[in-house]
Image (cartoon, rainbow, N blue to C red):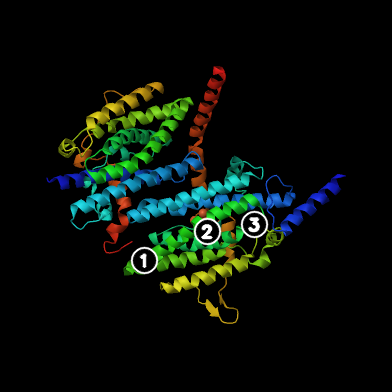
Amino acid sequence: METKEMIAAYATRLGDTSLILSHRLAKLYASGPTLEESVALTNISLDHLGQATTFYQYAAKLNANGLNEDDIAYRRNEREYDNFQLVEQPNTDFAFVMLRQYLVDAFNYHYYSALCDSNDETLAAIAAKAIKEVKYHYRHSREWLLRLGKGTEEAYNKLDNALVHLWSYTKEMFTPDAIDEALASLGIAVDLKSVQEQWERDVFEFFSELKLQIPEKIFQAKGCKEGNHTELLGHILCEMQYLPRAYPDAKW
Amino acid sequence: MDNNEEYQKNLLEFERKIEAEEKIEPRDWMPDAYRHHLIRQMSQHAHSEVIGMQPEGNWVNRAPSLRSKKILIAKIQDEGGHGLYLYYAAETLGVSRDQFVQWLHEGKAKYSSIFNYPSLSWADIGAIGWLVDGAAIVNQVSLCRTSYGPYSRAMVRICKEESFHQRQGYEIMCDMMNGTEDQRKMAQDAMNRWWWPSLMMFGPTDNDSPNSQRAMKWKIKRESNDKLRQKFIDKTMDQAEFIGLTVPDPDLKWNEETQHYDFGQIDWEEFYEVIKGRGPCNRQRLETHIQSHQEGEWVRNSAREYSRMMKEAKKELV
Ligand SMILES: [Fe+2]
Ligand SMILES: [Fe+2]
Ligand SMILES: [Fe+2]
């Protein structure tokens, strides 16, 4: 693969994770514990959607195959999506929503901080804009986890339950593939090993403050960068892509 | 001064302010009936913004492009924000938001009946923005001059965003009318279903609107239902014609004499049915709101417990 192609694939999968997370959050427009929180969740959804759009636009430019950002979002199938499986996980309850968000936010915080120094100017610029949003997201989800983890026993139990479920989708975020490695050696992609160290330091420390036990000996999903998914993604795409698929000639 | 004398003095001062177009502020004296009218109207308005998120939210995960997805999410978010401004403004009348929400759940407070209709296709998102927000703006622009200060200021903020919503909705309709045969059909179908309910948003005719008189006298309401409805029809007709949409009203025609459009009979029976809770989505809209409120209970409890603990920890430090 040429470097240009690799960067396009790299941008596309960053877009995929942002888009699917945005999609999940958008549905919570009126489901927050307060109206203020509903508004905050849609705000975060919009940030991720904006990130996805700019990543896809960049990928479209590099691909030069005539497909635009909407084609990338709306005309690919499950196996062509390379998002983290973590962001496909459902809005089961507010503990799931916030823990999912926290795990991704902590990742994004370190990841985008590093991507700001990318040798690829466009990726660096996208990251520089995203990091401002991510800092706010990270603070927001952390504040909520404090309230759930240190508040009532009921909330603590729900958080603990969410952790048992979601922890299975954390490892793969740090597993590099050939594209990560090739682009990292050029100073374009982020070194996942150092992101992992920083993420684990933050997360382990925070969870011990919340007295949350990290689940051991559980299933760890893998393969998000090879289009591997839970059964949930197909349904997300069914819904999301319905109109462009049903009316292929229509412009919206 | 005895009580009656005091009351008369306050009332005179209140009426002087209204007459002079001075705003009534939360700490000013106001007649009980004025306060109650506002509590009812402002909370109904706030609930409408919030319940109004549901028919649009029905399409939030099916928006057909990244741009339309962004616009729709942002619009729904705006409506949530409008709900917040209005609850804050209404709370200045001495009623808490919890109380407002409880009245909604008990069926004691209403919201705009337009949101009790289902959104069935993507064109409905266009029709809602164009017609429903379009009708809301006509009403809200007039409410910018309402006599209660906090309400008036909330309206000024809200109107700016509503005109975006109206334009974006119209843009969807334009794109669809310029699109494929299927898209044009969808757009016309949405027009057919949303037109009459949009006209009903202005409420009963002036003859059947007893509360209106008093609200006009106090300048809570600045223009009559019928006048606002006519304004809406006049401006919307041109936009419909321009993109080739047919208004589902055979009696609708330009009247040279009045310089307004004449229009057909509104189905007031349907209007009152929906108001009384017997519209297509009344039950569903309210149940959805109640359910998400209940699902948030444990979160709110935990947040409250957490802040109580933090306060206590602070006290111990001191
Ligand atoms: Fe509205
Ligand atoms: Fe609004
Ligand atoms: Fe609006």
Q: Residues within 10 Å of mark 2 (few under 14, many from 20)?
A: many
Q: In the rendered structure, which amino acid carries the disc numbered 3?
A: Thr
Q: Residues within 10 Å of mark 3 (few under 14, many from 20)?
A: many
**Residue A131 in sight:** yes
Foreground of the two, B267 or B65: B65
Q: Which residue is mark 3?
A: B146
Secondary structure type for disc 3? loop
Q: Which residue is mark 2?
A: B114
Percent coordinates x, y for residue B230 in the rendering: 58, 70
Q: In the rendered structure, which amino acid carries the disc numbered 2?
A: Ile
Secondary structure type for disc 2? helix
Percent coordinates x, y for residue A204 in the rendering: 33, 24
Q: Residue at x 36, y 65 (%)?
A: B175
Find residue A9 and report its image quarter. top left
Q: Is residue A117 left or right of residue B201?
A: left
Q: Residue at x 31, y 50 (%)?
A: A53
Ligand 3 within 8 angstroms of badge 1 C-beta: no
Percent coordinates x, y for residue B138 in the rendering: 56, 63
